[in-house]
Image: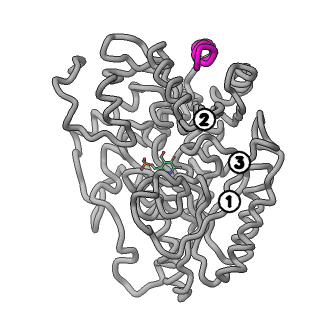
Amino acid sequence: MNESRPESMSSFWMPFTNNRDFKAHPRLLVSAQGMYYKDVDGNAVLDGTAGLWCVPCGHAQPKIVAAVSEMVGQLDFAPTFQMGHPAAFDLAERLMDYTNHKFGHVFYTNSGSEAVDTALKIALAYHKARGDAGRTRLIGRERGYHGVGFGGLSVGGIGPNRKAFGPLLPGVDHLPHTHNLGKNAFSRGEPEHGAELADELERIVALHDASTIAAVIVEPVAGSTGVLIPPQGYLKRLRELCTKHGILLIFDEVITGFGRLTTPFAVDYFDVEPDMMTTAKGLTNGTVPMGAVFSKKFIHDAFMEAPAGIELFHGYTYSGHPLACAASIATLEVFKEQGILENAKSLQPYWEDAVHSLRGLPHVIDIRTIGLVAGIELESIPGKPGARAFAAFKQAFADGILIRTTGDIIALSPPLVLEKKHIDELFGKLAAVLKNLD
Ligand code: PLP
């Protein structure tokens, strides 16, 4: 294992990174175990973000490591176009069980971005298959993040992610975001105000006509844009309106899936069922890249009524890769055997109190929590948006905790195997960082 500094860092063009700043002041991780990373200097770094929201069962989980190691020696690769391998089918059945059969089918991808683009394409093709080809419009939401494919970018609502890439997909509209610091600051769970913002869909329907709209996609809890939690009743209202107008509802559960809210999915937490659900990250405990689109049976069945032949001209070389399937099967077993959800549930009140204990520290203008997620919003330095939180991120890393920042919001989402002592360490160190921040 190479645990030394690379000789040169110039060739790797790093994603979503200030490359010049990073390469001048690198943060290099060389190994991971349980709740901790180790950096190149041998320092332990407590993982407050499950990597990038992807490691619910903790790092180097032995069962998952063993399953992937075994599979790579047995079946390193097998196509899933016009053939298959048993693990892909086995996993699909287990995933249906894990969703409590709220969905009937699953389509494999390799990432959240691909899952989103796949779900959007399935929505368009579904309406066409039913002879409703006029339904081509896609509706996203301001401040939504749905990955970086052209579909996900188009329905996404984060300005800096979009502005360099031209007009994106035509025929896309956006609901307003639900973030309202004036009314909902320092909320625990779903904030009180804002369910009526779902009614904005009626305005969009009045403008374009329902017969032109294929699907609405939202994150049940928006993560990458800084932890925006849906107001009480908002998602139910959105569901009602989509049903009323024959519009498919897609939940992007790339971060909320696999236990983040202490339930298997946000679908369970909010008791609202979309027609499709996109997932990735925790699906394999982050061990091997994989995404998946869950679809209601009626959507899949509409394709099966076509004349014999390939029903959906879509897929990826690595859809259902054997290593990813092995990792995911093992992840589902670990969830059950290790009581991952139960641990998350039992720690949630302690987590919530610990996060809200930061209220009153310098620059903290909001704290919001749900499940094992926290958003801590800092007041921006005038003219330098994002600078204050980024300074906090750098100092936190130097002090041995990994946090994530987006704009001036700190987003926390630890592995679900954490214990009280990890919560104490995380917030003890974070409080010290915030107290000393300019
Ligand atoms: N959708 C949501 C809600 C996400 O949070 C992310 C990534 O953070 C994605 C999609 C994109 O996933 P990926 O980076 O695996 O393409």
Whole-Å distance between the Cαs marked 1 and 2?
A: 25 Å
- Marks 3/2: CA–CA distance: 21 Å
Q: Which secondary structure lies at badge 1?
A: loop
Determine if the C-beta at disc 2 is less than 8 A from ligand 1. Answer: no
Circle 2 packing at 10 Å, graded few (<14), some (14-19), many (20+), is few
Crowd class of label 3 (few under 14; some 14 to 19; many from 20; radius 10 Å): many
Q: Disc 3 designates what residue?
A: 179
Quadrant occupied by the N terminus: top left
| Frontmost residue, 190 versus 361 | 361
- Taking the spot 58% from the left edge, 33% from the top edge, the residue there is 411
Q: Quadrant of residue 355?
A: top right
Residue 346 visible in this rendered orientation of the protein: no
Q: Which range of residues does the magenta coloring cover?
A: 425-438
Quarter of the image where the C terminus is located: top right
In this rendering, the answer to whether 278 lies above or below 40 is below
Report the amino acid beneath label 1: Pro
Q: Earlier in the sequence, mark 3 or mark 2?
A: 3
Q: Amino acid at mark 2?
A: Pro
Determine if the magenta segment contains residue 433: yes
Q: Which residue is mark 1?
A: 176
